[in-house]
Structure formats: structure tokens, C-alpha cells
Image (tube, helix red, strand yellow):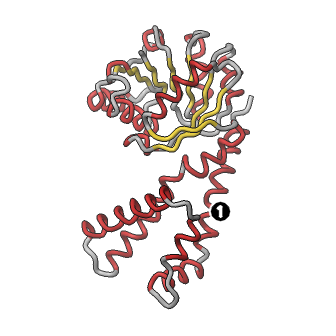
Amino acid sequence: MKISFIGAGSMAEAMISGLVNKNVVKGEQIHVTNRSENTRLHFLRQKYGVQTTYNLQELFHQSKIVILAVKPKDADEALLKVSPYIQRDTLIISVIAGVSISTIENILNIHVPIIRAMPNTSAAIGQSATAIAKNAFVQDCHLELAEALLSAIGMTMIVEEEKLDAVTGLSGSGPAYIYYIVEAMENSAQEIGLESELAKKLIVQTLLGAAGMLNHSNEKAENLRIAVTSPGGTTEAGIRVLDRHNVKDALINCIKEATLQSKRLSTQYHR
């Protein structure tokens, strides 16, 4: 099965890494192109054994799946460029944030199955949280194929397209929020006298343990937090500081703003 990637950025690499490392497809079955950065293509070719080309006829020849992974600002140009090569039996999977299925349909100007997906960069280790939506031309066989591919890079769920902006704000950008918090924990570790290597191990295991508790417990996050926050204890002292700085509100507003930005992109690229 030949899979063609339009775009070679971090999301494309995360998906390629997941697919190759999970042995879903071999590297040579994946073909990749981008606008002009040959150095990037060379890197992917060397690291994952993928095929790279700027010859679009070669790229699309016998390609059953085309994955659109360009930046939103480059979407129009990329779609117009590839539209002459799209066949009616080609399954299009778009991971372009904020670009709607109707926009893709209008630019391609062909009745073709399109699945819009919102994975995150944890796809690189098979741990993405991916929501997908589909157009009217997607049949069960297309959906099964897309789910098989995307499940190889993590958890997959089907949603209505109007929910994808919220998914983008919550889980699409979500890893960056966690890394941001970890940055603060690492900085604090240095200030309280813990070596960076020791601190990283403690932080990572703390995150894994908390995620495991959330995954295996029926309790809400709030209840789990309360259970470890003893009156007059160290956790309560720390939480009190977070509350004083309105950290919870800041995170809520962060996700809302990311969701709004996805909606702004949708409006910007609406046709």
C-alpha cells in the first residue's frame, strides 16, 4: 500500500515515525514531498527510509492514500498544486489544522473521500489522541482503513466536524501545554536544589503515574486531587499558590484561545 504525504513538517514526521516504528507500513511504501526544502526530505529519507520526490505524477501514481500535512497558511497553494493528480478512488486524510472538509472539497473540485483528522505529535511514539471527521463520500472501507492507520499512532475516535476546533484546542495542542508545565517543574527543581537528571526522572514518573490513575480510576480529576491534598500539608500549600495565581483559569483560557484560533483559521480558509 502506497501512502503519499504532502508536507514534511513535525506532524508528518510524527505520523511517519509511528507508522514505520509500529510496522504498519515499510518506509519505502511512504512517499513524501514538500514545497521546496530538500534538506528536510533528505533527513526523512535517511531516518525512516521513505521515498521523496518533487515529481507529483510519480508521487500520486498508484497512491491509495494521500495525507495532507502542510501548514494552514500553505493549504490553498498545496491543494491547488495537487488537485490535477487526485483520482476519485484516492482517500484524502487531512491533518491541516483549521481547514474544513468543505474548503478542501471546493479547492480540489472532485468528489473524493476526505477524512479530516486532528492528531498530536505524540503520534511519534504511538500515543496520539486523534479525532476524525468524514465527508459524504467516505465509505466504510475508507473509514476502516483510516482508523487502522491512525490507531497505529494512538487512540482514534470519530466526531462531528464542528467539534474538531475544540479537539484542536484541547488535545491537538495539548502536549505543548504539558511540556510548558514540565518546563516550570524543571526550573523549580533547579531552584530547590535537585539535579536535572534526577528531576526529569521524578517529573516523568509523576506524570505517568497521574495519567495512569486518571485512566484506571472512575474518579474525576478533582476528586483525585482532593484525595492527595491533606489539610495543612505540602500539597495544599502548593495548590494555594496555584489558586492565588489563577493557574486553572489561565489553562482554561489557554485552551479556549487555541480553539478560537482554530475557528479563525477555518474562517480564513473557508471557500
Name the quadrant containing residue 126: top left
Relative height, residue 123 to residue 253 (above, below): above
- Where's residue 240, x and y in %? 55, 83
Q: Position of residue 207 (x, y in %)?
A: 41, 62
Q: Quadrant of the N terminus?
A: top left
Q: Is residue 60 visible?
A: yes
Q: Nearer the viewer, residue 261 or 94?
A: 94
| Front in this rendered view, residue 41 or 60 | 60
Quadrant containing the C terminus in the rendered view: top right
Q: Is residue 219 above or below residue 61?
A: below
Q: Residue at x 61, y 31 (%)?
A: 116
Give the left or right position of residue 114, taking residue 173 as reference. right
Callout 1: few (<14), some (14-19), or many (20+) C-alpha neighbours within 10 Å? few
Q: Tell me the amino acid under the disc marked 1.
A: Asn
Q: Tell me which residue sits at (64%, 39%) in the image.
A: 98
Q: Residue 81: horizontal and vertical position, in percent?
A: 57, 18
Which residue appears at 47% of the width and 81% of the height?
235
Could you tell me if residue 179 is visible in this image?
A: no
Q: Is residue 113 above or below residue 228?
A: above
Number of numbered discs? 1
Q: Residue at x 56, y 65 (%)?
A: 221
Can you give x and y, in whole percent of width and height, for residue 229 in the image? 50, 80
As helix, strand or loop, the secondary structure at mark 1 comes to helix
Which residue bears the numbered disc 1?
253
Q: Nearer the viewer, residue 185 or 139?
A: 139
